[in-house]
């Protein structure tokens, strides 16, 4: 079959592939524990459900404007004022089919073929693939000091005349690390001085722990929204546990948003009316579900950290937010794909290889499931890797016997 050169460079999304694998195994009755997922287990806010139900009851589910319905844009404007300290106009806002589409359309609007997009590593698996789909060049930057906290110098050293965009995801998927306010200030200032677009992927910005507060990039620019090079992306998927609703948004200069609207209009048209109204319900409703989810995740993080820190040979940086940690298993196996496959085969624990995020030897482990899944999942992993573990392990009534070294 003849396919395009760009298509041949694109890899399957590891996270989606693993979700499918886990679903198939569960359908077969396998005792799968999914520590690779990026999907909170909480229910969507009741206001989201009732708003969607009301539209269904009306029977008037029609096309929507390419950049989103007015009530959703109004809710995003209020959200931006509350959490970012900026009052923006409707023309500064576009609603999309998830934060992923908002990022992709923003890249389509500003990136030319062969131009570069820089992002700190480890990075979300879709960043390099989105850039390659547009004929651009992804430039991951791993901090030279060995931490997961990027420095401006690390990024500045990789900037060339072809650099068009820098993307920042904080708190970060996969590490859970929240970048410092000093770093955000430096990167905003640097992009403004160099005329580089800065995309802030803030999809986890309310799911942060230990009393931390979200950092607003707008607090570190003296420019108004229309004069800045700043694009802020967010959505309902993570904070409201509404992953299947697929509604995200971007806030940026009016001229850029106009271009994004035109692109999206040809690409997919406007997002689903039903799902946009659900997002309106979530954004305008009682926000206790976000606080409840954050507290649950913080407790789950603590449990996972306790289990991993008692695991000899595993090193992990304590996450500041999200629902992931990025654990270093290189003392056991430097090939993260091989390790992930071993854990799935031997004890039916799903993890995501660190190689997918730009750093081999690590696994991304999710703590958005139940405490039981976290504790049992880590115990199964330990049984596979610890040479001093008992020779047998029971999963339910099934007895497993170690047949490897």
Image (spheres, rainbow, N blue to C red):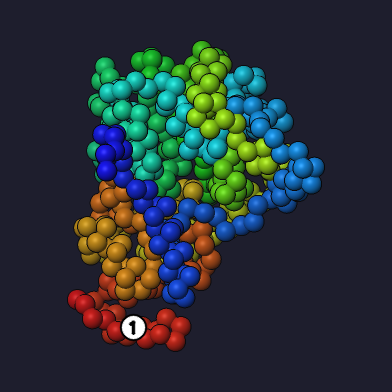
Q: Residue at x 59, y 42 (%)?
A: 236
Q: Is residue 377 above or below residue 267?
A: below
Q: Nearer the viewer, residue 92 or 377?
A: 92
Q: Is residue 343 above or below residue 189?
A: below
Quarter holding residue 40: bottom right
Q: Nearer the viewer, residue 364 or 264?
A: 264
Q: Residue at x 41, y 33 (%)?
A: 168
Seen in the image, is 385 located left or right of residue 305?
left
Seen in the image, is 256 located left or right of residue 86?
left
The answer to whether residue 147 is visible is: no
The answer to whether residue 131 is visible is: yes
Percent coordinates x, y for residue 241 in the rendering: 59, 51
Percent coordinates x, y for residue 245 in the rendering: 60, 46
Quarter of the image with the C terminus is bottom left
Q: Nearer the viewer, residue 108 or 180?
A: 108
Percent coordinates x, y for residue 370 in the rendering: 53, 66
Q: Is residue 239 above or below residue 139?
A: below
Q: Residue at x 36, y 56 (%)?
A: 352
At label 1, counting other C-alpha atoms closer than 10 Å, the crowd grade (few under 14, some 14-19, many 20 or more) is: few
> Mark 1 — residue?
400
Q: Is residue 302 above or below residue 242?
A: below
């Amino acid at each position: 079959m003849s396919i395009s050169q760009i298509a041949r460079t694109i890899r399957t999304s590891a996270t989606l592939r693993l979700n499918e694998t886990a679903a198939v195994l569960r359908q077969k009755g396998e005792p799968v524990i999914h520590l690779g997922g990026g999907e909170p287990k909480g229910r969507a806010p009741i206001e989201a459900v009732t708003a969607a139900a009301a539209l269904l009851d009306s029977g008037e589910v029609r096309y929507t404007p390419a950049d989103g319905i007015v009530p959703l844009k109004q809710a995003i404007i209020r959200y931006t004022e509350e959490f970012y300290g900026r009052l923006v106009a409707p023309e500064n806002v576009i609603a999309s089919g998830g934060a992923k589409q908002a990022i992709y359309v923003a890249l389509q609007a500003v990136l030319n073929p062969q131009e570069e997009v820089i992002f700190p590593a480890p990075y979300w698996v879709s960043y390099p693939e989105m850039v390659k789909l547009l004929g651009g060049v992804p430039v991951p930057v791993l901090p030279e000091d060995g931490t997961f906290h990027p420095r401006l110098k690390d990024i500045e050293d990789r900037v060339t005349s072809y650099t068009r965009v820098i993307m920042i995801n904080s708190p970060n998927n996969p590490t859970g690390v929240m970048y410092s306010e000093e770093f955000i200030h430096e990167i905003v200032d640097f992009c403004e001085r160099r005329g580089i677009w800065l995309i802030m992927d803030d999809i986890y910005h309310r799911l942060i722990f230990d009393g931390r507060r979200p950092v607003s990039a707008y607090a570190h620019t003296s420019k108004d929204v229309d004069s800045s090079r700043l694009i802020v992306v967010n959505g309902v998927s993570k904070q409201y546990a509404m992953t299947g609703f697929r509604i995200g948004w971007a806030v940026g200069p009016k001229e850029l948003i106009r271009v994004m609207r035109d692109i999206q209009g040809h690409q997919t048209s406007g997002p689903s009316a039903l799902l946009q109204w659900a997002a309106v319900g979530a954004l305008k409703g009682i926000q206790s579900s976000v606080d409840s989810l954050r507290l649950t995740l913080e407790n789950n993080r603590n449990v996972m950290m306790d289990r991993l820190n008692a695991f000899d040979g595993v090193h992990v940086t304590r996450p500041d937010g999200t629902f992931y940690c990025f654990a270093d298993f290189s003392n056991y196996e430097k090939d993260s794909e091989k390790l992930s496959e071993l854990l799935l085969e031997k004890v039916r624990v799903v993890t995501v290889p660190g190689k997918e995020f730009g750093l081999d030897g690590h696994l991304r482990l999710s703590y958005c499931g139940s405490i039981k899944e976290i504790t049992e999942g880590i115990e199964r992993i330990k049984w596979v890797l610890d040479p001093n573990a008992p020779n047998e392990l029971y999963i339910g009534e099934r007895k497993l016997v170690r047949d490897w070294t």
